Amino acid sequence: MLVAVHLVASGFRVRFIQVFLNAAARLPIWSSWSMGRAFQNALRASGQAGLPADARAPDQDACHHVQLMCEAAWPWLATAVALAIVLLAPLLVIDVPPLTDYPNHLARFFILAHPDDPVLSKMYAPHWTILPNLGMDVIGAGLLRVTDTHTGGRILLALCLLAPVGGAVVYHRVAFGCRSYWPLASGLVAYNAAFFMGFMNFLLSLGLALVGAAAWVALRRRNRPGWKTLAGAIAAVATFFTHIFGLAFLFLLIGAEEAAEIRKRWSSGTATAHDFMQAAIPILVALAPAAVLYRLSPFGDAATSLGAWHAIVKLMRLFSPFTIPDINLTIVTAVAFIVAMFAMRRHLAFTPGLRLAIAVLAIVYIAAPLRMKGGSHIDLRAAVMIALLLFAGVQPRIARREAMMFGVVFAALILVRSAYVAATWMDSRDDLADLRAAIAGVEPGARVLAATGSTEERTMAPPARRTLPGIYRLTYHLPALLLVERRAFWPLLFADPAQQPVTILPPFDRMSHSLTEPIDWKVLANEPFSAETLRWERYLVDWRSNFDYVLLIDPKPGFQAIEKLSPLHDGQFAKLYRVERPDALAPHRTGREAVAPSGYTAPAGSAAGSSGSASAITNLSP
């Protein structure tokens, strides 16, 4: 399978681009977009449906074709179902997909779902409060109470994967007033850098924002200002509790829509002060509940720190909407999409305000630092938003032959990209098995420090399945399985009080550090540590006394040995060491024994307790 996918990604891409460019160069007068048989009868008119009156051609026959297309629901629905199956299929091949932040999020969901766990409740406690990142935590905590941990986790990933595509479909349907295959082509960017980074709340918020903006547009066109404002307020609260960037995206779409209407009136000379007030007041009223929640949340009081700005990084992240672990498929997908949009540039119908929204997001992409107020990869997120809008707010109008060609190419790319992801994740099962073998004997309540050997070459070092080209390493938070499957303490759980509803209890809070990465093995091997190192990894203070084990993932060949660490598991991807220390320096273990009583049974979905004993650790020793 993997060989076949690589052949498609490499040997075929040059010929594909040549054929694609030649076909695009021969485009005649264009009038619609199609990716299926039912849409062929409506090709010459679908681009006009839902447009403002002054943008529509007075073609009654075309309007009739659009009506026929809208009634032919089953072929469109069949295409949508097929798309969902193709996108979700990779989630069936592995129980813990290698998505950077996902294992860390899953560990937090697990804590929230099992607040009375006899081991974890001594280390962590739910802390529900007003936060802008609660969406997936609420859903995850409820879901993991009734499902196996890894089954529930993949259901959550499926929701995050499909939410932006579903939002694009809903927004497009409302904006253009007809059923179209074009927004289904957003499956081309369903697997993007944000998904592989594990930005679950962010992706869910994009879908909610598009649906909320669609509701606003529909009610505004029906002249229902009160209901429009109420729908906007509900959408604002929903997106606030999912992700703050989703809230910004929602009001960017709403504001751009209203600004386009004001501009239209201004151009015709009919704009009045009342029109400005009629546009501004509903937006301010709808935003008010979210603004109040922001002020009440700890996130509102968090310091606004800015990260670095790198031009090279900006250039590399232009491909973020198309980025998957294979750089060849990433480039082929981006080129195919750019060529298609360029070929159709004079025959694209845009929703009102879409150009303004894209322009604002482009400015954000260029100007944003790498990190701000605890949020990271802002430019990457802006690029994904732009790509989604090009499917949600655009209606191409092309002739039958070229429409089918574009449809077949895009469908093939979606299929190949999903197949490649599935093949890559199948290979990643070896890494996951090695990690589980390494931690199989870690007893509940043990304290494990995680280190990595890949920090210097995080974005391009082989093998490809462990990297997101030019962006990040995909394996950094896999040690979170220590918490989920072994009930062990791991110092890097996402538990920032301004962003997550989990509190780390004493004394574990002094040996943890949220929102950071595993320590570089070379840094760990070179004590004493600098003040800068301890600033970002405060858990390194007295680490030999505070931790029982060290887990090394993704090691480099020939890495430096660290004294007083006894090897227990020596795998290709994961290595486990016991921290040696005199009995006088060992932490008092009575409390740990108390939280892991004999006869302890782990909740469903965890391996903890199956071999959780000191003797199991001893048996791993070479």
Image (tube, rainbow, N blue to C red):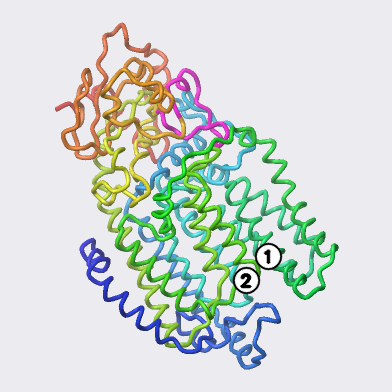
Q: Could you tell me which residue is drawn at 49 percent across and 48 percent down?
A: 200
Q: Which kind of residue does numbered mark 2 sit on? A: Thr
Residue 539 at x, y = what percent?
40, 23
Crowdedness near tag 2: few (<14), some (14–19) or many (≥20) residues, C-alpha within 10 Å: many
On residue 351, the disc is 2
Q: Give the mark count.
A: 2
Q: Mark 1 = which residue?
A: 257
Q: Could you tell me which residue is drawn at 34 percent across and 30 percent down?
A: 519
- Judged left or right of residue 159, residue 56 is right
- Judged left or right of residue 373, residue 258 is right
Q: Could you tell me which residue is drawn at 37 percent across and 55 percent down?
A: 91
- Judged left or right of residue 247, residue 569 is left
SS of the residue at dot 1?
A: helix
Residue 369, relative to residue 615: is it above or below? below
Q: Which residue is at the far left?
A: 622
Q: Are marks 2 and 1 in contact (CB under 8 Å)?
A: yes
Q: Which kind of residue does numbered mark 1 sit on? A: Glu
Residue 328, relative to residue 409: is it above or below? above
Residue 366, relative to residue 308: is it above or below? below
Q: Could you tell me which residue is drawn at 64 percent across and 57 percent down?
A: 252
Residue 577 at x, y = what percent?
24, 25
Q: Which residue is at the far bottom?
A: 61
Spatial distance from mark 2 to mark 1, Cα to Cα?
8 Å
Q: Main secondary structure of the magenta part?
A: loop
Residue 160 at x, y = what percent?
49, 54
Mark 2 or mark 1: which comes first in sequence? 1
